[in-house]
Amino acid sequence: MRRLVSTLAALALAAAVPVAAAGSASAHEGDHHHVTTVWVKGDGSHVSLSRSHVDAGPVIFHQSTSNSGPGGSQISLFRLLGKATVNTFKADLAHEFSSNPATAAKGTRELNRDIRAAGLADVQKGYPASVRVNLRPGTYYLMDLGSFFGATGPSGAPNPALTRLVVRGTERDSAAWKDDSGWDTPTIWLTSADRFVGPSHLPADGSVTFRNVADTIHIAQFSPVKKGTTDAQVQAYYDSGVMTPPPFALNGPSFGLDVLSGGTHATLTYDMPPGTYVLQCFVADDVTGMPHAIMGMHKVVVLK
C-alpha cells in the first residue's frame, strides 16, 4: 500500500508539461582535459547514443528526451557484476518494482549485488541535463523507464530495452580511478541513514555533485512544490497514507539523478526554473521494502 502511495506521489509531483524550453545544460568541460562527451537521447522507452565506445575515465553524458509525457526520460547507466546477466538484472528490476514490500526489499538487495549503477539523469522534454561520471573499462547498459511511469502509474514489471556502451581500457586508466571531480559545486551526500545531507539552496542553473556514501542504491529526484513547503509537511503527507496528490505539489518540470550505487558519485548539470523543490528517493529499503522517501529521505531545497 505504501509502495503504491509513493508511486502516486512521485507521479503527482513529477507530472507537468513544460511550457518553455530551457537552454541546454552544459557541463564545465573547459578546465578538464581528456573528458569524453556522449550525447544521449531518450524517448521514454529506448536510448540512442552518439557513440557506442568510449575510453575509460571521465565521461560527460548530455541528455535530452523526445517524450512529452509526464515521465519524460528516466535514464540509468550500469554495468553487471559477478555472474549477473541481463536476464538476472531484469528479474531483479521486476522484484524492485513489486507492490509486495518483502519482494521489493529483495529487489534492492539483488540490485546492490548484481549491478554498479552510475546515475545519469531524469529529464523532461525541453529541459536537458548533463551528468559527469568516471567509468572503468567494461560493458555498460543504458535504459529509459520514462514511459513506464506514465500518467496512470507503472503497470506490471518493466522489461526495458537496453543500449550497450563499451568502455575501453587505455594507458590513462590509472588517472580514471581518481576522484578528480573537484569542481566548485555544491555537494549532496546520500547516506546509509536514508537521508540527503547538503545545502538547502542550490543554483537554478548550475551543477551539484551527488556522493552516495551508503551501502545501497539511491536516486535523487527534484519535484516542484509550493513556496514555503517544509519537510515536516512532506513527511506528514506520507504518514497519512492518503491516495490523493499532495496539497503542496506544483505543476512544473521535474529532474534529477537516476540510480547511483553506494560508493560512487556523479555531477549533475542542469538549467531549471527557480523555485522550491523537494528532493526525494523512491528506492525500496533493502530490509522493509518501504520507499526511502516515506522513511524520511526527502529534502526541501530552493533553486535560485
Image: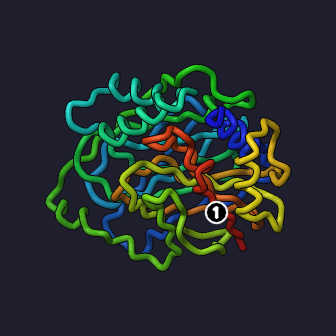
Q: Quadrant of residue 156?
A: top right
The x, y position of residue 244, in whole percent, is 82, 38
Query: Residue farthest to the top?
Result: 156
Q: Quadrant of residue 81?
A: top left
Residue at 34% x, 61% y is 58
Q: In the drawing, does residue 161 fall left or right of residue 228?
A: left
The x, y position of residue 271, in whole percent, is 66, 63
Q: In front here: 210 or 162?
A: 210
Query: Residue farthest to the bottom?
Result: 184
Disc 1 target residue: 299
Please tell me how many numbered marks the rendered image carries. 1
Where disc 1 sits, the SS reads strand
Residue at 51% x, 75% y is 185
Quadrant in the picture for the N terminus: top right
The x, y position of residue 21, in whole percent, is 74, 53
Q: In the drawing, does residue 196 fall left or right of residue 176?
A: right
Q: Is residue 19 visible?
A: no
For residue 6, above or below residue 256: above
Q: Is residue 216 visible?
A: yes
Q: Residues within 10 Å of mark 1 (few under 14, many from 20)?
A: many
Quadrant in the picture for the C terminus: bottom right
Instruction: Look at label 1 and name its amino acid.
Output: Lys
Q: In the drawing, does residue 304 fall left or right of residue 228?
A: left
The x, y position of residue 226, in whole percent, is 83, 60
Residue at 61% x, 54% y is 280
